[in-house]
Image (spheres, rainbow, N blue to C red):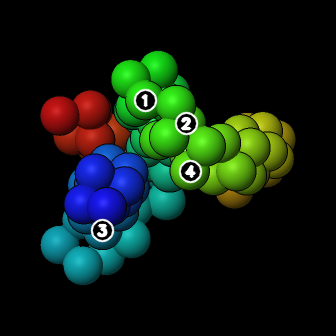
């Protein structure tokens, strides 16, 4: 059962990265979701059981990410905010 909770670890790390000193960083939302999607795909490949748990979240994230990429608010903040690379670590 503990292994199933590991699926939340990448999401928690992404959430922390997006909350820069307790201030949300909108510019980091798209890159952060990309990282989370990659991590969850990796976890899905390691275990069929994990894949079953992750699949619904991936569907939701990928739809949300697609809509974010078309939003002028996200596009403008990503262009204007220069500290995006801190989310990659």
Q: Are marks 4 and 2 in contact (CB under 8 Å)?
A: yes
The residue nearer to you, when weighing 14 against 6, is: 6
Cα distance between the residues tagged 4 and 3: 26 Å
User: Looking at the picture, how far across and down is residue 12, in whole percent?
Assistant: 30, 62
* Residue at image location 55% in from the left, 36% down from the top: 51
Q: Which-is-in-front pick, marks 3 and 2?
A: 2
Residue 5 appears left or right of 27: left
User: Looking at the picture, how far across and down is residue 31, in whole percent?
Assistant: 46, 37
Cα distance between the residues tagged 2 and 1: 6 Å
Q: Mark 1 points at which residue?
A: 47
**Taking 25 as reference, is 52 above or below it?**
above
Q: Name the residue under label 3.
A: 19
Quadrant where the image shows the C terminus: top left
Cα distance between the residues tagged 4 and 2: 5 Å
Q: Do the residues labelled 2 and 1 touch (CB within 8 Å)?
A: yes
- Quick one: SS at disc 3? strand
Q: Mark 4 points at which residue?
A: 53
Q: Give residue 21's quadrant in the image.
A: bottom left
**Taking 17 as reference, is 22 above or below it?**
below
């Amino acid at each position: 059962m503990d292994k199933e909770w590991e699926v939340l670890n990448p999401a928690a790390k992404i959430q922390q990265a997006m909350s820069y000193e307790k201030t949300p960083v909108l510019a980091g939302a798209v890159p952060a979701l990309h990282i989370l999607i990659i991590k969850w795909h990796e976890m899905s490949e390691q275990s069929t059981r994990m894949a079953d748990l992750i699949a619904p979240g991936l569907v939701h994230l990928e739809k949300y990410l697609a809509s974010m990429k078309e939003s002028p608010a996200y596009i403008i903040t990503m262009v204007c905010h220069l500290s995006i690379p801190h989310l990659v670590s």
